[in-house]
Amino acid sequence: MKNAGRIDGRTQLIGLLATPIGHSLSPAMHNLAFEKLGLNNVYMAFEVGNEQLEEVVRGMRALNVRGYNVSMPNKTAIVQYLDELDDSAKFTGAVNTVVNTDGKLKGYSTDGSGYVRNLREHGIDLKGKKMTLVGSGGAATPIAIEAAQAGLAEISIFARNDQFFARAEENVRIINEDMKHTQVKANIYPLEDQEQLREEIRTSHIFANGTGVGMKPLEGKSVLEDVSMLRSDLIVTDVVYSPAKSKLMEQAESVGATAINGLGMMLWQGALAFELWTGQEMPVSYIKEQLF
Ligand code: NAD
């Protein structure tokens, strides 16, 4: 009998547990990659919040699902239900990828390594460099941790005086104390101190926005009040990818700096998760060409 489609009795499920979920680009990205490589997997998004999470994890384990992505609001809540954490998840306290090996669930965070890998694809090595980073939320925290792992010499973290400030303090403590082996010097400053921000950027190789400033509802805004803080030999990165050219990216381009938006980080966090589940490299340039 002819197979009517890609799905048959041996198709393995990979999931995504988050809410809201409808806007996610991950199903399109992973399914296209499975198809391109001829892998018998399917990627499905499931509307799951904290209340259903424990039950869903148990169900996924019972079904022997190979793995899944985890997004908001489940990234930290999932930790308690897993058997083991990779360092990337341990230091960030969050998981975006779960791998099921013979019923044993291991959590990873590929957001930060996706960020670092994307920089590498742009020919940028973080070893010995100084980074100034704004933010300490779900995107900024893995960037800080993974950039430190990748060999930065120094990182200055700026955080707004809101509920995320304590996490910024925690990130600095983790880098300086728990990750002593990296020998990275981490500093923390209030984002309100724009003169200190100017000074830290002046001595940095990379300036990174890890906040949602620049995307809806803050589209057209930037964490930088004054574009004269930027210069042409600076690398400026944004976690925002919609719009593709945020206000910060415009500011960076206006002074001739290297501007790298959040699309590559998003693609590479997916590619690294894909590799963890399948053992194969995601065809990233094909995906980029087809989807973006
Ligand atoms: P979050 O709510 O966990 O963290 C938000 C961070 O932004 C906090 O540090 C907060 O202090 C800061 N912040 C919020 N409003 C601010 C303002 N007006 N001025 C200064 N700082 C402000 O959110 P998140 O999950 O970290 O997401 C942040 C952004 O990153 C979103 O735009 C999201 O789409 C994007 N993101 C991109 C990727 C990627 O792969 N490119 C991955 C995850 C998130």
Image: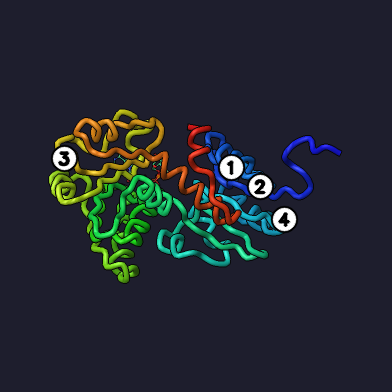
Q: Are marks 4 and 1 in contact (CB under 8 Å)?
A: no
Q: Residue at x 52, y 56 (%)?
A: 77
Q: Pinpoint residue 17: horizontal percent, then vertical percent.
A: 58, 47
Q: Position of residue 183 (x, y in %)?
A: 27, 68
Q: Gap between marks 2 and 3, in whole Å?
A: 48 Å
Q: Which residue is mark 1?
A: 33
Q: In the structure shown, which secondary structural element does the residue marked by tag 2 occupy? A: loop
Ranked by sequence position, the earlier of labels 4 and 1 is: 1
Callout 1 secondary element: helix
Kindly identify the residue that appears in the image at 55 percent across and 56 percent down. Answer: 276
Q: Residue at x 41, y 59 (%)?
A: 92
The residue under label 1 is which amino acid type? Ala
Badge number at residue 63: 4
Vertical side of 247 occupied by 231: above or below: below
Q: Amino acid at mark 3?
A: Met
Image position of 50 (left or right of 171): right
Query: Which image quadrant: the N terminus?
Result: top right
Query: How far apart are labels 4 and 2 at the CA level?
Result: 19 Å
Q: Which residue is mark 3?
A: 229
Q: CA distance from mark 1 to mark 3?
A: 40 Å
